[in-house]
Amino acid sequence: MKIEIAEMIGKAMTMVGWSRRTFANNAQLRLDWGLDAGLIYRRHDFEIFAIEEDSVARTLSQSAGDSWLRTFPENCLRGLKRTPNAKTLDRLTIIDLALRTPPLGLAI
């Protein structure tokens, strides 16, 4: 993933204005809805990305993930210095997919 794409995701996280707990909860709700609806999730490069029921909880809701959810968007606003590592790439993919999945009220 390019730095520019990671920065766009971080800036989108800032734009929605959710707290880190709300972000994790909303991401889980949106992705669970998508799984129930039979959506096939794809990464930004169109590769299929397998999401399981506990993907968000494992990736975002851990204590380390909580602080990361707060600091990553702030770092994106200042500009990232390096390409995301593999662990960050998984987080960014889940966040990107959650942001692109319609809110439940609009999906029904």
Image (cartoon, helix red, strand yellow):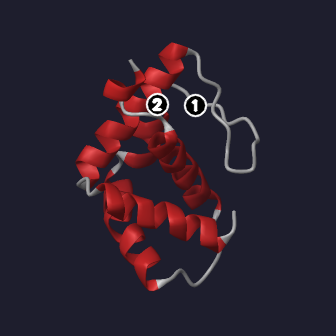
Does residue 28 appear in this view?
A: yes
**Residue 17, horizontal then vertical, whole percent:** 26, 57
Question: Identity of the amino acid at label 1?
Answer: Ile
Residue 67, image quadrant: bottom left
Which one is closest to the eye, mark 1 or mark 2? Answer: 2
Q: Is residue 66 above or below residue 58?
A: below
**Res 104 quadrant in image:** top left
- Marks 1 and 2: CB-CB under 8 Å? yes
Residue 84 in view, yes or no: no
Name the mark on residue 31. 2
Is 16 rendered above or below residue 102? below
Residue 60: give its label.
Answer: none
> With 42 as the anchor, is 103 left or right in this view?
left
5 shown above or below 75: above
Q: What residue is shown at x 39% (from left), y 68% (from top)?
A: 73
Q: Earlier in the sequence, mark 1 or mark 2?
A: 2
Residue at image point 68% right, 50% down: 44
Q: CA distance from mark 1 to mark 2?
A: 8 Å
Q: Which residue is drawn at the image coordinates 27% and 54% (left, top)?
A: 20
- Nearer to the camera, 91 or 15: 15
Mark on residue 51? 1
When asked about the image quadrant of residue 86, the answer is bottom right
Which quadrant would the N terminus be assigned to in this image? bottom right
Name the residue type under label 2. Answer: Leu
